[in-house]
Image: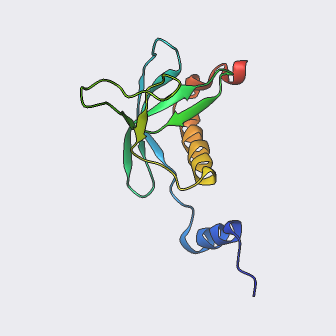
Amino acid sequence: MKRPGESELRRGETATWGQKPQPRIRKFTPFRNAAKTILGFITIELSSGLIINDAKLMIGPQGRRWIALPAVKQVDQDGRPRLDVHGKQIWSQIIEFRDSHTRERFQETILAALRVAHPELFDGEGGQ
């Protein structure tokens, strides 16, 4: 017997338990850094009840929005930022995903919730 795929499992879950609650944007605080790569800080409440504070809504070179999860700057024993071979600061992820597919699904879901709660954040998205 063939194992069901992920989409079949999700349809079965929905039929059994109903529609899964979606993440909620609890708070958005606008912020612009000097490089203009950060649009603001987000507090996200996941359907599990987990609350993620200080995620960032970022903007890429082509205007594409993405979510950066909280991270801590690495420092040496003297308190100076640690740098990689290219001279960029090194950060330690606090939360991470097991694979790129899971990360992409999270990104899409949170960006969709942000589009509903704060559509103005997406004006000019994609370099328009």
Tell me what residue is drawn at x 32 percent, y 30 percent: 75
Tell me which corner region of the image, top left, top right, bottom left or bottom right, holds residue 66: top right
Q: In the drawing, does residue 28 fall left or right of residue 37?
A: left
Tell me what residue is drawn at x 70 percent, y 24 percent: 126
Can the viewer see residue 39? yes
Can the viewer see residue 43? no
Tell me what residue is drawn at x 43 percent, y 32 percent: 90
Against 47, residue 127 (above or below) is above
Place of residue 111 in the rendered image (x, y in percent of width and height, measured from the top left): 58, 38
- Of all residues shown, which one is farthest toward the right? 2
Q: In the drawing, does residue 120 fall left or right of residue 2?
A: left
- Of all residues shown, which one is farthest toward the left? 78
Tell me which corner region of the image, top left, top right, bottom left or bottom right, holds residue 108: top right
Tell me what residue is drawn at x 57 percent, y 62 percent: 19
Q: How many numbered discs?
A: 0
Against 21, residue 62 (above or below) is above
Camera-side residue of 38 and 48: 38
- Of all residues shown, which one is farthest toward the bottom? 1
Place of residue 101 in the rendered image (x, y in percent of width and height, measured from the top left): 64, 53
Camera-side residue of 54 and 24: 54
- Of all residues shown, which one is farthest toward the top? 34
Against 49, residue 78 (above or below) is above
Tell me which corner region of the image, top left, top right, bottom left or bottom right, holds residue 81: top left
Against 32, residue 107 (above or below) is below
| Image quadrant in which the N terminus is located | bottom right
| Image quadrant in which the C terminus is located | top right
Camera-side residue of 83 and 116: 83
Q: What kind of colouring is applied to the model shown?
A: rainbow
